[in-house]
Amino acid sequence: MKDLAYKIKADFLKALAHPLRLQVVEFLKNGEKNVSSIIKALAIPQSSLSRHLTILREAGVLKSRQEGTIIYYDIYDHDIFHVLRPIAEMLRKKLKKSEAVLNSLGKD
């Protein structure tokens, strides 16, 4: 049972582990968008975007709805940003530390 919980968590994180998918999630942060607006805003080929949207939807990160021929995507649960914000903060700290080390290299 415990192994299954780790597998589920890993699969969820794996769905987020792509720069384009993270871009899509951030783009949808402020609300639902249709596929063509995502393509236009992120300058992504439609076939590539479709693949990534499917992965995010199947992982439960996104939800979709169809209105005629137009498909809209939105964040399934905005609590995802409670996961992404601390990661961004950790990376900022790491980059700041790396910057300090690099700046000190030329001072000897």
Image (tube, grey):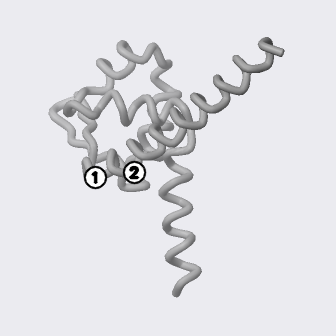
The number of numbered badges drawn on the structure is 2
Per the rendering, the mark at residue 40 is none
In percent of the image, x 36 and y 15: which residue is there? 41
Residue farthest along the front direction in this orientation: 108
Given residues 83 and 47, the one toward you in this image is 83
Measured in 3D between alpha carbons, the distance from the residue under mark 1 to the one under mark 2, in whole angstroms, is: 7 Å
Q: Is residue 50 left or right of residue 17?
A: left
In percent of the image, x 57 and y 28: which residue is there? 96
Query: Which quadrant of the rendered structure holds the C terminus?
Result: top right
Q: Is residue 57 above or below residue 45?
A: below
Q: Which residue is mark 1?
A: 79
Instruction: Name the residue type under label 2.
Output: Val
Q: Secondary structure at mark 1?
A: loop
For the residues bearing labels 1 and 2, Cβ distance under 8 angstroms:
yes
Q: Where in the figure is residue 16, as x and y percent of width and height? A: 49, 45
Q: Which residue is mark 2?
A: 83
Judge the density around disc 1: few (<14), some (14-19), many (≥20) Cα neighbours within 10 Å.
few
Given residues 38 and 30, the one toward you in this image is 30
Q: Is residue 72 left or right of residue 18?
A: left
Given residues 71 and 16, the one toward you in this image is 16
Judge the density around disc 2: few (<14), some (14-19), many (≥20) Cα neighbours within 10 Å.
few
Q: Secondary structure at mark 2?
A: helix
Residue farthest along the right direction in this orientation: 108
In percent of the image, x 37 and y 36: which residue is there? 25
Quadrant in which residue 84 is drawn: top left
Q: Is residue 15 above or below residue 33?
A: below
Q: Where in the figure is residue 9, as x and y percent of width and height? A: 50, 65
Instruction: Name the residue type under label 1.
Output: Asp
